[in-house]
Amino acid sequence: MTQNIWRESNIDDLEYYLKENRDVKDYVLVKIFHNDNCICTIEGNTKLKQFKIKIENEDSQEVFQALKYTGSIPLRFTYTQSKTFSTISDKMTTDEGFIEWFNGLINKKRIFPDTNILLNRTFSTLEESLEKQFVNNSFEIPRLLILELEAQGNEKRDNNPSKDVSYLAGLKKRKALIGFSELLYLTSNDAQPLGQLPIDTLTDFNDIAGKGRTDAWTRYEIRERYFQILRARSVPNFIFITADMVNSLAALAEGLDTIYISQIPDWKNKILSTNLKQISRFLINLSILYTELTVSINSKKYNFKGFWNGITTTDIINQQIRVQEF
């Protein structure tokens, strides 16, 4: 990283720097600042390959979101059947045997994710942190999810001049772009979008979304897929995966088996140790969420830009940021 020159960097670049740079050596202390306020620190040993992330600003939702992108927060997966409304089983991502349990649960079933699964980058994070592939051609993406991401990414800012309002509007857009990265990750691993929507659904989408009915229409789209398979004389075996409790309950009431993903209440006290790849991913995503950070790595200081004028689709897809040493 050459001084005063902006260079594009991705997860692999950061991991290599932390692993090989002579300034880092064995011990790493990373301090992350936004607007001169330290929001979190990372400390660890490159030989032991274990690092602890400590939150310095309790109000930082962006740090929490980046931790979810990194797989640093334990999550609970609860599987419930629609016929009995009873929980069949549940496991934490940190439980022994989680991989076998989850893999067996989704095997030979059609998997339909909710929008929040894309926004939280659930499957790319799960696969990277557990080093196991789950996504395949049994994953199907409702078209309304794509429309919802597009609407969130294109949402126009209102005329409120407040800096906070402007920042939150931009944050919503950046989260949508991260959601598109997850969507492309799923499709690159053979997940299939559902068929085209009727023209009246497309033209009425703003009204559907404006009245908070996107979730209901998404479930309707999944049920239509159910009847399509039934008409082909096949047995539909569906699972709807969501991190929204209300959507999970509504799906159960409408006959869809669900996996509800929830966080543990005391997650701040149970942030998991991470490796260099996860630390790199954390820094990248935190930069995108905040747009700009100051990062000190031992004795060196850097500006990290996660969003800038001229950013390209390639930058978004590959999760590239700009880094400048100073």
Image: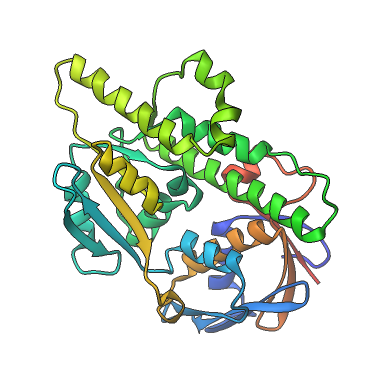
**With respect to residue 90, does 73 lie above or below?**
below
Relative side of 238 to 192, left or right: left
Q: Residue at x 30, y 54 (%)?
A: 132
Q: Residue at x 78, y 44 (%)?
A: 158
Q: Residue at x 67, y 55 (%)?
A: 321
**With respect to residue 104, does 230 lie above or below?**
above
Please tell me in which quadrant of the rendered image residue 75 appears.
bottom left
| Coloring applied to the structure | rainbow
In the depicted view, which residue is nearer to us: 30 or 253?
Answer: 253
In the depicted view, which residue is nearer to us: 322 or 31?
Answer: 31
**With respect to residue 285, does 250 lie above or below?**
above
Q: Position of residue 160 (x, y in %)?
A: 82, 50
Q: Position of residue 45 (x, y in %)?
A: 48, 83
Please tell me in which quadrant of the rendered image residue 34 appears.
bottom right
Q: Residue at x 29, y 69 (%)?
A: 94
Q: Position of residue 248 (x, y in %)?
A: 33, 48
Number of numbered discs:
0
**With respect to residue 48, does 209 lie above or below?**
above
Relative side of 7 to 153, left or right: right
Which quadrant: the C terminus? bottom right
Which quadrant: the N terminus? bottom right
Relative side of 135 to 24, left or right: left
Can the viewer see residue 46 in this picture?
no
Can the viewer see residue 79 in this picture?
yes
